[in-house]
Image: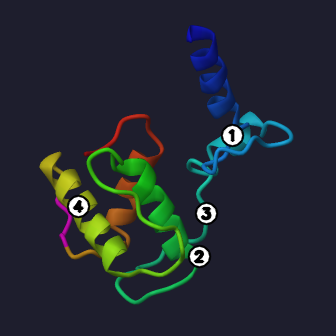
Amino acid sequence: MARKLVSLTLALLTGAITTAGVASATPRPAEEIGVLIRDCVDVPNRDVGLGDTGDYVREVQCLLNWAINPSTHARIAVDGRFGTATESKVKTFQRCANALGAGLVVDGRVGSRTAPHLEWWAGHSAYIC
């Protein structure tokens, strides 16, 4: 069991496993690992909310699934459509971040204030809530 855990940890650190659980053909270089957060698509940040669609919505959905514990808050679809499930998950994230002193407006939108917090939490091994 310990050997399997070490192998999985090394694979995650080298980027040999994607969020879908499919192994990559070759590990990514160390400098590239920091560019993508947990293999979520990376597009320029902008303000998104209910009704928006596109790649940035997909990125937000992916990051939310990594930042919030799936055993306490259900995962959402990474479909590029910012619907009520995504809005609810953003509000949950904003409330959890505020409990730690972030001072975010709980409005269900991801803009210049919420995005950096979301990216930070998605990139770390601990869940925000």
Q: Point out the stretch of residues depicted in magenta.
A: 102-106
Mark sitting on residue 17 = 1
Measure how far apart labels 1 and 4 are at the Cα level: 28 Å
Tag 3 near tag 2, CB within 8 Å: no
The residue wearing badge 4 is 92
Foreground residue, 106 or 26? 26
Helix, strand or loop at label 1? It is loop
Tag 1 near tag 4, CB within 8 Å: no
Residue 89 included in the magenta stretch of the image: no
Q: Which of the 4 image quadrants contains residue 41?
A: bottom right
Residue type at mark 1: give it. Answer: Ile
Measure how far apart labels 3 and 2 are at the Cα level: 8 Å
Tag 1 near tag 2, CB within 8 Å: no
Main secondary-structure element of the magenta-colored stretch: loop
Residue 19: % across, % down: 60, 49
**Which residue is rendered at x = 73% and y = 37% of the image?**
16
The residue wearing badge 2 is 55
Mark 1 or 3, nearer chain start: 1
Residue 22: % across, % down: 72, 45
Mark 1 or 2, nearer chain start: 1
Q: Nearer the viewer, mark 3 or mark 2?
A: 2
- Dot 3 crowding, Cα within 10 Å, few <14, some 14–19, many 20+: some
